[in-house]
Amino acid sequence: MNARPDPGLFFDPSKCFIGGLWVAPLGGDYLPIENPSDGTQIGLIPRGSKGDIDAAVTAARAALTGVWGKTPAAERGRILARIGQKVLERADDLARIEAMDVGKPLKQAKADALALARYMEFYGGACDKIMGETIPYLDGYTVYTLREPHGVTGHIIPWNYPMQVIGRSVGGALAMGNAVVLKPAEEACLTAIAFAQIAKEVGLPDGVLNVVPGLGEEAGAALTTHPGVNHISFTGSVPVGQIIQRAAAENVVPVTLELGGKSPQLVFADADLDRALPFLVNAGIQNAGQTCSASSRILVERKIHDELLARMAERYRALRVGPAVADLDLGPMVSKRQKEIVGSFLGDLGGAEIAARGTVEANAPNGGHYLAPTLISGVAPNNRLAQDEIFGPVQVMIPFDSEEEAVAIANGTDFGLVAGIWTADGGRQMRLAKAIRSGQVFINNYGAGGGVELPFGGTGKSGYGREKGMEALYGFSVLKTVAAWHG
Ligand code: ADP
């Protein structure tokens, strides 16, 4: 095996983490790690197989029947808090590793590391605050409910925000006392492996967290079809979400699916454009648009369409793209494949026009997957640019004439993840917050800085189930009703 791990790594990326041990993949196969900023290979990760997943599920089951199953909630909380503390201490290292692995600018990578720490703090504090109820019932009975872990939870996560998704899904699952098997995306395994190393260092009992890198159709499929898995949390694309839902049906296992979106921001003529502008643009280009909750549609009241278009175009022309370590507005796309997918959208504008583009730095390495952010105007609501998730730094502007039309366009896709409303009219804020079909609605802001505390998830093809906030803990647990007759 010719792994050449970056000397700055504080873990060996070529190992799976199973039962508290670092182990080579059973099949002896590996996958290359690419640095998308220059296309170089920077090491190897395991190509985990069915056998590795089986070993991980077995280790997780053993943890449940062993020490983890008997660990009091407050002690679970302390362990999660210690993980959070260590993540904070290593935030710069984690940011550098993530930037190298997925190409995100350092400041975004650092924000992700801080969010991971926040999730651990939040869920650490929540462990002993999830309570059951007593239920008034017939004479002679006492009835109460218990919130219990599912057992083994399987987590299949994407490459775009590995640390944040680990925080919200693994954090919530551990808080409720589940034992976890995590299959990170093949493009982005390093911070998942780093997370396991940190968890081991702070004393998370063996087998409670297991990490098996590998391909989706191999390790991922083995995890979602494994009869020893009791719950599956998936964040990724719609087609893979559908495969996972079908796989889960076989074992009748609950799933949480977060499948992306086509999230709109609605800008009315009375909006405070000075405040709105940075949110409008950033929500489209952050992480090079590779964000489930990216706002890829800007719906604008026709009266101010030309003004807003001109102001957004000015901002787009100032955006700079370059290597992750240069820490500019955008880094590269995660892979050549992702760049080609976005390029295919831009190759067919369906009558729309490119209003403005950012600039790829002249000295950006040739092997990197760079793409200039692109603002598109004159887009009909039924254009595929306005219907399909592009997952790249592309925003479309769509004019509307009335509140009713704005709502119809906002709701006129298969998705419903996040929406933003920009207006000074309080009544309209409340009406639209109800009328828009979406898991989250933001009024005169967008994204609320990530919001560890805010329940997050979709409607329609954006998926179902909620992660983040206290709400996630209900999803990561099962309710048991106890009815005692005592006469
Ligand atoms: P993207 O297309 O953006 O890479 P995917 O939905 O393909 O997103 O990937 C998200 C996660 O799902 C990754 O961890 C990937 O390995 C995993 N995955 C892909 N295919 C499958 C599958 N058939 N079964 C289980 N997991 C899968």
Image (cartoon, helix red, strand yellow):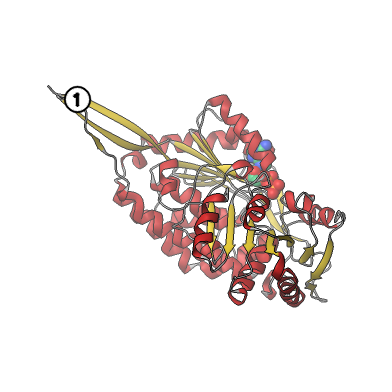
Dot 1: few (<14), some (14–19), or many (≥20) neighbours within 10 Å?
few
- In the picture, residue 300 is in which quadrant? bottom right
The answer to whether mark 1 is within 8 Å of ligand 1 is no
The image quadrant where one finds ligand 1 is: top right
Q: Nearest the camera: 156 or 393?
A: 393
Q: Nearest the camera: 114 or 382?
A: 382
Q: Residue at x 49, y 39 (%)?
A: 153
Q: Residue at x 61, y 30 (%)?
A: 247
Which quadrant is the C terminus positioned in?
top left
The residue wearing badge 1 is 138
User: Is residue 47 among the parts visible in the rendering?
Assistant: no
| Residue 31 horizontal/vertical position (percent) | 71, 48
- Residue type at mark 1 is Leu
Q: How many marks?
A: 1
Secondary structure, mark 1, is: loop
- In the picture, residue 335 is in which quadrant? bottom right
| Residue 259 horizontal/vertical position (percent) | 62, 45
User: Does residue 138 appear left or right of residue 295 in this picture?
Assistant: left
User: Does residue 66 appear left or right of residue 23 in this picture?
Assistant: left
| Residue 340 horizontal/vertical position (percent) | 82, 54
| Residue 7 horizontal/vertical position (percent) | 63, 66
Q: Residue at x 49, y 54 (%)?
A: 167
User: Is residue 350 among the parts visible in the rendering?
Assistant: yes
